[in-house]
Image: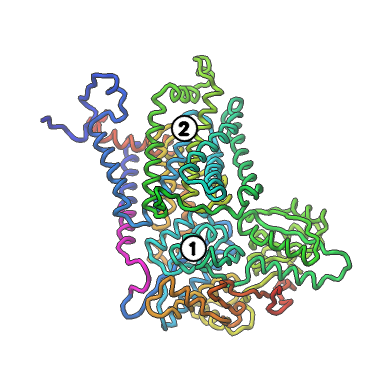
Amino acid sequence: MKSRCFSLAALLLALVLAVSFAGCGGGGGSETPGAGSGGDAQTVKIGGIFDLTGGTGDVGAPYAEGARAYVDYYNNKGSGTKVVLEDIDYAYQINRAKEAYDKLVKSTGVAAILGWGTGDTEALKSFIARDKIPYISGSYSEGLADINTCPYNFLVAATYSDQARVALKWAKENWKESRKPRVAFVFNDTPFGRSPVEDAKKFASELGFEVIGDEVIDLKALDATTQMLGLQKKQADFAIIQGTSNLTATTLKDAKKLGLKTQFIGLNWAADEKVIQLAGPAAEGYIGVIPFAFPYDQVPGMGEVKAYLEAKGKKLEDVNQKFVQGWVSAKIMVEAINRAGTNPTGESIRAALETLDGYDTGGLCAPVTYTAESHRGSEKVRLAQVKDGKFVYLTDWIGYK
Amino acid sequence: MQVRNPLVMDCGIFTASYEDDMAILFHPAARLKVLFILIVLAAFPLVANPYYVGLANLVGIAVIGALGLNILTGFTGQISIGQGAFMAVGAYTTGILMAKLGLSFWLALPAAGIVAAMVGAVFGIPSLRLKGLYLAIATLAAQVIIEFIIIHWVGLTNGPAGIVLPAPVLFGYSLESDTAFYYLILALCLAAVVFALNLFRTRPGRALMAVRDRDLAAAVAGINLFRYKLTAFALASFYAGISGALWGAYMRVISPEHFTIAVSILYLAMIIIGGLGSVMGSIYGACFMTLLPIILREAADGISPFFPQIGNTILALQEAVFGLIIIIFLIFEPEGLAKLWKNVKDYFKLWPFSY
């Protein structure tokens, strides 16, 4: 009897789910695909594929928050095209990214997308090109800068490879000893982690580094002792980290525990306030490649971030640099949507993005330039070193060329 | 014209030949039902939004993979945590043949199945000596080794960068759209289901089940254990290979990230939820596990306008709810969705005299 009741309950549940799901289907199907179906106030839908709960959620969640915040801020300003951001958490899983992309493009009918990871953006690039969806990803992988295979992908900051090159060039210039400096690479075994490694190794050899090898650490690893022992044995002078805050903090802590002399330099996602928070004193002296401003930087662009947060009852101290990254990415996309005129479509937004020439975000990132030949927004970054629990800039905006 | 209670189906049908006795669709009403389902499946992409067709494609690919694993684990009793890796073999075979050698998809697809079957058979060799948890760890090794090879044999697989595949072409017509791909997957799914249904009515199929139930007794009864266990591994991997090949051709890009141990565990969960040793259960399980996260997400989206402040909490809760639903299902019906569905049918069939 009991099991029969359960069977019936399960059947009812299944029916309810099926009906609600079919309901979603009807709703999705009846919407007009494409943008600008509004009346007087023009409305454009854009999509967000973010990682809030997956492997890179530590940096993905503040990034998504920043992107949402900018769209909110912009809509409250009340001028120009209204932008609706429909975002989906894909938990850093490529198959879910594809599903989310299909939903956004085929069901929601978005004109452009703010994406996230390297693996999924790479996986989606052929669809992005086919569907003509301007796509700003959280990934700055060199592969996405190839305009022939990725005509609709745009990078808002220097590519990982360029970031690594800047770091290596700086390290070489500040190298005092007469022997060759030894450099190692610390990364996670994903397309994101491996993205800059080949390019960076090549550049390091050209600069006169001795490239001594790789250490692979998992994104969610809580222990990196083995890898740090490896670095210790090879006597690395420099180690370039490509990972996220968690991985970096683990690395720095274990390196300190073993007393390594290696100077660690982390690329964009490996360098933010969270690293200092998690690694504590072990973060002292750590150098980050910083393509975006910190919330405490005195730059004009931070004024609107501050105004928005205060209107929401928050302070600049409540957000971190990854929030600023999300904010900037959304800002650039929205700027292009505004420039695209009436009824922005994928193609017109792409054309509008290509009109950005030295676009100044008020110092939130290096000036961004897109042309029909290149969608690399910028090649410049700043280097900052942790001193007394805070990133202090070592350089101004520099490139490697 | 006889008037019958439409809910009472199996009463009063008598067969006069062995052929009728052996029919899968025993009752005329069952034949009608299957015909109806086929018509619905065939018409689905014509009426549905392309997004839902895309979802159906993901489900279809999962059905083939889950069926394969169910043949191995559910019907033959050889536990495997390597299904994701065997899918990877299929996907990479297709990718290498299509993108690097320029072969047609129609050659690459069977090749993917065959290569995966061979690799699967090799990793099935320990099954003669190992059982249960020991075998699970041996198949886990397959997962780790194959993943390692894919990441590090860069010359063949492009390593973590992955391979981009061209769209399959049929008679000069590119199967790029979701709808075209849907029919390809549907056809292969039907073939996979029909083959599996019939397999367990044949001598080799029965032998597989004998191996599962008591391998010593099966050996005494004259079943060559080594041969049948390897056959089961090869067959399961063949299904996985086809599933992986379809996945690659549909996603158009493959990288090692697609085929992690999480995928293997997901497929294991599919057949456990759906019903071990049940062909239909594999289908239910594949649908359930593929669609549940999406349904939960939609539900969270639906709730969040009413409770905006807990929007992010719901997102985090989704994973927990996902786990909870699975646990509840397993507690109340360990034999899976297939048994649950049978209970529901029995209830109506026997009503009002259920005892």
Is residue B295 in view?
Answer: no
CA–CA distance between discs 2 and 1?
A: 36 Å
Residue A371 in sight: yes
- Magenta part of the chain: A19-37
Residue farthest to the left, as pictured:
B1
Residue in view at x 52 percent, y 21 percent = B215
For residue A358, what is the image quadrant?
bottom right
Label ID, residue A49:
1
* Main secondary structure type of the part rendered in magenta: helix
Neighbourhood count class around disc 2 (C-alpha, 10 Å): few under 14, some 14–19, many 20 upward: many
Side of A36 relative to B98 (left or right) = left
Q: Residue at x 48, y 69 (%)?
A: A134
Q: Give the chain letter at badge 1.
A: A
Would residue B29 appear left or right of A204 to someone viewing this image?
left
* Local secondary structure at mark 2: helix
Q: Quadrant of the N terminus of chain B?
A: top left
Q: How is the image coloured?
A: rainbow
Disc 1 residue type (three-letter):
Ile
Q: Is residue A155 above or below residue B285?
A: below
Residue closer to the observer: B111 or A207: B111
Magenta segment: does it hold A26? yes
Quarter of the image that includes the C terminus of chain B: top left
> Which label is found at residue B71?
2
Residue ID at (45%, 62%) = A130
Q: Position of residue A61 (x, y in %)?
A: 54, 65
Q: Is residue B241 magenta?
A: no
Determine the secondary structure under disc 1. strand
